[in-house]
Image: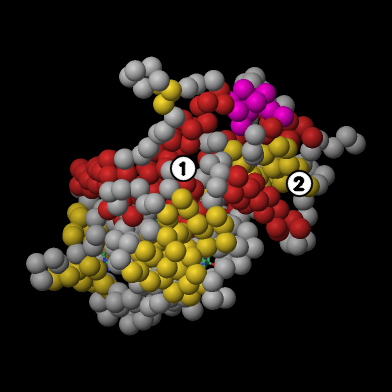
């Protein structure tokens, strides 16, 4: 029986473990901080649970537009909603811990051994050494190793988190009161999601964005729509602003920008990107190549430069998502254990920014079309003309389709709107299976529905010969 050791129990590691066990291997997962990884314990799951509450707050704030008012027990109008952040965060942490223990239970029920400890590859690659919490060590012999150790928040010497008012995204769940004024530094996906969540929860929010618009890596039209909505709702977005230092004096946090300006608030979240957990793993000694950012270099079937050693997930960089981590881990195990392998195609990855509105994307981007990297037709259809959107009071958002000229094969798409994360699926299916705009256009959609706009966009891309 082939023996596989997986170092890291996040989505990259635990999904691989399940596949390897299914394919007949004897599997050990060595995990340091809790099965489920950062995805479940500190990043993806807690942030999306917090956002679920913040979305509800935002919907309730908009209820008046749809004819709903609130009144108190005496029948007097009540207008003020507030979030009890202590309760919200208790729910967030409980849900994350429960999910971690569900996953661990699933692994152990399948006969996968979980070792709590920090793993590293021995100079002899056939062995992983786990440093155990009691100070002891365990050497685990194996035929293949998967490294899936993830990444952690990037911090700077000039902006040291104190866990109370200057926070990484992992530390925000210990807040028991809503910050009066939250300053979010960094306007990538993490920064924008937190800025939007705290705004919806009722905090004053300033977002320090180093570029001229938020979400520099996303579709420019989508980022512009989101930025307009956030500013309309009162967020102070400081564009082209780089944080130099963050300091705290009592209850006041000061963010100093490189141009000398200063912003003061009650709290600050640092969302400056991630660095890979690739130190102290014995990688260099095992002949495993890293790139200049410290990420493990892998090929499309998750092989590293060392025979028998695979890597998956955030420690390899690229598209840093739970879904891609899980897929890379599964691919590694299928490859090693001789099952049919379909190499990872990043053009088929659907991703979502969980803001209000959400931004979901798949495939080639408008930027790639505009730069000439890919030749395509693009069409953007705003949701404000959609009957369901009108009924629901949705005025911001659009569907964008990107298709090959001539054949009409769909190669990309963007949806901006409520639950865009769900609406992107048919477009993802089209991209991965090569459907044409005409096939989408000729598929029934429910009337009235937001997805009617996807079909309508496809109809508008039809070429009459
Ligand atoms: C705030 C935030 C929100 C996010 N939201 C989403 C989202 O909504 N959707 C999405 O798809 N992605 C999201 N992501 C990205 C997603 O969380 C990551 O891509 C995902 O966690 C990567 O999984 P992984 O298995 O590579 O690593 P991780 O989840 O980081 O797991 C790695 C595990 O390895 C362990 N480990 C590290 N070193 C060792 C060692 N030496 N020995 C043993 N164990 C070790 C760690 O303790 C951890 O348990 C978000 C990221 C952030 C920061
Ligand atoms: N919904 C999701 O799926 C989700 C949510 C969060 C994160 N993620 C993933 O995690 C990965 C990382 O995203 P991220 O947003 O954490 O990191 P990022 O690297 O994309 O963004 C960090 C931002 O911080 C800015 N920055 C750095 N130093 C700064 C300074 N001194 N002053 C001002 N700005 C500064 C950078 O310019 C950059 O725009 C992404 O690949 C993303 O896909 C996914």
**Distance between the alpha carbons at the discs numbered 2 and 1:** 32 Å
Q: Where is residue 464 in the image (x, y as percent from the top left)?
A: 88, 34
Asked whether mark 1 and ligand 2 are closer than 8 Å, the reply comes as no
Figure colour scheme: secondary structure
Label disc, if present, on residue 396 of the rendered structure? none
388 inside magenta stretch: yes
Residue drawn at 20 percent across, 47 percent down: 108
- Which mark's residue is nearer the viewer, 2 or 1? 1
Label disc, if present, on residue 200 of the rendered structure? 1
For label 1, count other residues whose C-alpha is less than 10 Å away and answer few (under 14), some (14-19) or many (20+).
many
Chain-order first, disc 2 or disc 1: 1
Label disc, if present, on residue 378 of the rendered structure? 2
Q: What stretch is highlighted in magenta?
A: 385-394
| Residue at the right extreme of this rendering | 465
Q: Where is residue 99 in the image (x, y as percent from the top left)?
A: 28, 43
For label 2, count other residues whose C-alpha is less than 10 Å away and answer few (under 14), some (14-19) or many (20+).
many
Q: Say if 63 sits above or below 49 in the image.
A: above
């Amino acid at each position: 029986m082939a023996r596989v050791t997986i170092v890291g129990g996040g989505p990259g590691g635990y999904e691989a473990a399940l596949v390897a066990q299914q394919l007949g291997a004897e599997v050990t997962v060595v995990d340091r901080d809790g099965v489920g990884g950062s995805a479940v314990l500190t990043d993806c799951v807690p942030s999306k649970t917090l956002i679920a509450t913040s979305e509800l707050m935002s919907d309730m704030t908009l209820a008046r537009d749809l004819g709903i008012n609130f009144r108190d027990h005496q029948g007097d109008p009540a207008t003020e909603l507030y979030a009890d952040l202590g309760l919200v965060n208790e729910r967030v942490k409980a849900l994350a811990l429960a999910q971690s223990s569900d996953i661990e239970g699933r692994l152990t029920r399948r006969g996968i051994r979980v070792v709590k400890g920090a793993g590293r590859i021995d100079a002899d690659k056939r062995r992983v050494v786990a440093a155990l919490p009691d100070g002891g060590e365990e050497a685990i012999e194996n035929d293949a190793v998967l490294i899936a150790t993830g990444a952690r928040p990037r911090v700077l010497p000039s902006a040291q988190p104190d866990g109370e008012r200057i926070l990484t995204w992992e530390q925000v769940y210990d807040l028991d009161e809503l910050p009066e004024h939250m300053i979010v530094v960094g306007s990538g996906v993490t920064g924008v999601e937190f800025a939007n969540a705290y705004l919806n929860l009722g905090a004053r929010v300033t977002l320090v964005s180093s570029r001229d618009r938020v979400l520099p890596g996303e579709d420019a039209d989508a980022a512009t729509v989101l930025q307009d909505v956030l500013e309309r709702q009162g967020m102070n977005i400081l564009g082209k602003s780089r944080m130099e230092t963050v300091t705290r004096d009592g209850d006041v946090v000061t963010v100093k920008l490189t141009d000398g300006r200063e912003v003061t608030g009650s709290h600050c979240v640092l969302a400056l990107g991630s660095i890979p957990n690739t130190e102290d793993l014995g990688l260099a000694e095992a002949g495993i190549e890293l790139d200049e950012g410290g990420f493990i270099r892998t090929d499309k079937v998750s092989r590293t430069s060392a025979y028998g050693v695979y890597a998956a997930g955030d420690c390899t960089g690229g598209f840093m998502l739970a879904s891609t981590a899980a897929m890379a881990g599964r691919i590694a195990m299928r490859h090693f254990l001789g099952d049919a392998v379909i190499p990872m195609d990043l053009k088929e990855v659907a991703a979502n920014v969980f803001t209000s509105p959400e931004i979901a994307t798949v495939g080639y981007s408008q930027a790639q079309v505009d730069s000439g990297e890919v030749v395509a037709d693009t069409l953007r259809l705003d949701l404000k003309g959609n009957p369901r959107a009108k009924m629901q009071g949705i005025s911001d958002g659009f569907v964008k389709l990107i298709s090959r000229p001539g054949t009409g094969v769909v190669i990309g798409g963007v949806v901006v709107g409520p639950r865009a994360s769900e609406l992107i699926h048919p477009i993802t299916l089209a991209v991965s299976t090569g459907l044409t705009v005409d096939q989408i256009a000729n598929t029934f959609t429910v009337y009235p529905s937001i997805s009617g706009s996807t079909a309508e966009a496809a109809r508008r891309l039809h070429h009459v010969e």
